[in-house]
Amino acid sequence: MARKTKLTNSSDEADIASVLAGDSVFAIPYFQRPYKWKSDRIKQFQKDILEVVDSLIADSPDNHFLGAIIVHGRRRNPSDPTVFEVIDGQQRLTTVYLFIAALISVYSQSQQFDEAVGLFQKFISLGRQGGLASNLKLHTGGEDRRQLNDVTSELLTIPELRTRLGTYQPVPLPNSGSSNGPLKKNYASLKRFLSEQKKANGIERVRLISRAVLENFSVVQIDVNDPANGPKIFDSLNSQQEPMTIGDLIRNEIFSRVADKSPADVELLDRDNWQPFYRNFKHNDKNLFDSYFFPYGLTQNPNLAKSEVYNYLRDSWKSTSTPTEIIEQLGRFQNAFLDIATGSNKQNLTTPFKKAFQRLFEVGLPAASYPFLMNLSEALRKEELSNLSEALEMLSCTESFLVRRAIAGFEPTGLHSVFKRLWQDLDGEFTVTKLRQEIRKHGTVQWPNDSEFRSAVEHRSLYGAAITPFFIRQFDMSLGGEHPVGSHQIEHVLPRTSTSDWLKFFTPEEHKKYVDCLANLLPMTGGLNSSVSNDSYFDKRKRYGADAMYKSTREFAESNKLWTPAELQTRAKKLSEWASSRWKY
């Protein structure tokens, strides 16, 4: 008979029998998404089996490659079985496990007990418990455990099989999840498939099918040393699927510590500790959960790269006794992070600091600044800073640095190097002088001086820039206006589409030069903005003065009887003088 060949060049490609037959357990994290293969996937699996069977009959064996299975091996004691935590491959592993269980059922019903017992001992359960909650060789996630227990229990309703198994009696997983679902449905489908094949072609057909799957279906098992690398490999191999995140890995790490507890204990930890922590990250229609861990990691170790965060945190928890303590540690900077990311005040800071952090949120903070600001916020909450006026000046200084850069058009490139160690670099000297000194040490990260900043305010086209709504709002408030966040649209006094009325005052070249500059932009409600549109300045000015909600717009109408390049340049200088005083260098 012809020899089977591998489908890949990987030395790690192995047939299913070799992967599943060892002294090991494949454990799907308790809160992993459940098994969900639909009937069309099972039908394709059966079709693939029959194609390989045909190749065996033709003495030209074909292999079927199931793909990569990404795991992280854990061994508690040298004598224990290796527990492979499944990062990717749950659906395929579970389907193969169900197929083997279906084979055992059909062999048993056909009185082929030697083969049934051999498969059970080799692939379904370990001959010992090995300090685990169950001796089954597949530990499904919490939602599928009851169904898997029902499958193995059904096999043991066959008295002869149960007797022959002897010490290989399976110890079920702690029951959890529904009693019905895709897992039991697909098990029944696979039993029907094998029974139909036996009825049509006899027990030898079932043996050929067994050989086809166990010897000619192959996988590449990738055992990652660092589980944090699992998502990278997963993402590369499964571009059409949803990759795991650092948040998934952290959750799985925490719950792996209670894997042998009862489902009631696991659910209690989830309900009372994990879910309150997780739900706190939900803000409007966003969930900021996965965005938290890199800045949190940097508060613990400012030298971490993003790819190192999970590994560092996991190592730091080795001496931590309980999952509850880990969740408490993770929650230390949670509210500080959320205030910075959403503009809230979960830290309950006093009004001046609340407003300072809210302004920074409106600036559109780069994520690089989060670790420094999280540390500062937490120090304020814990009343660890003795000079509050200096702390407030530090926040104003940070705002000025970021606003000046944004107005001047500098990308946030390089800010990570400024901020990641900034809290530590202050070395306990929490003053604005020390802060400026540390920021300016980074010579390649520009902090625009007054000349550069004023020039940008006067001449840069800033319509559409993320910083522009904040600038306009702050100017309006400086005049005494009440200006709710996100309330205004931006009106072009000189319209973006020039008309004959406007061409009397602005040449096409001047229109291009000035139309998107700050001096030509006003805050306005949506209804008024659309109604004035391309009107002449004479008509616009009347509406600005009579109907505008914003004080800066009303004052503009009062101060400018005409709107020509000369008036525009005058207002530009006024804005640049105000801005350079408002955000000091």
Image (spheres, helix red, strand yellow):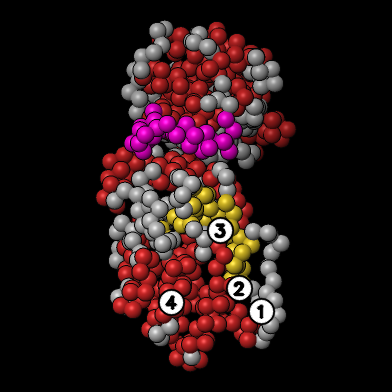
Amino acid tagged 1: Pro
Question: Which residue is disc 1 drawn over?
Answer: 61
Give the number of the disc on residue 116. Answer: 4
In the orientation shown, which residue stands out farthest toward the bottom? 200
Q: Residue at x 45, y 12 (%)?
A: 391
Give the number of the disc on residue 216. Answer: 2
Q: Does the magenta run of residues contain 318?
A: yes
Q: How many marks?
A: 4
Q: Does the magenta run of residues contain 447?
A: no
> Is tag 3's residue or tag 4's residue first in the polypeptide sequence?
3
In the orientation shown, which residue stands out farthest toward the right? 509
Q: Residue at x 46, y 21 (%)?
A: 375
Residue 223: x %, y % from top left: 57, 51
Residues at badges 4 and 2 in contact (C-beta under 8 Å)? no
Q: Residue at x 33, y 74 (%)?
A: 163
Give the number of the disc on residue 69. Answer: 3
Amino acid tagged 2: Asn
Name the element at disc 2: helix
> Is tag 1's residue or tag 2's residue first in the polypeptide sequence?
1
Which is in the foreground here, disc 1 or disc 4?
Answer: 4
Above or below, 547 against 86 in this view is above
| 3D distance between C-alphas at marks 4 and 2 | 20 Å
> Looking at the rendering, which quadrant does residue 464 occupy?
top right
Above or below, 115 against 361 in this view is below
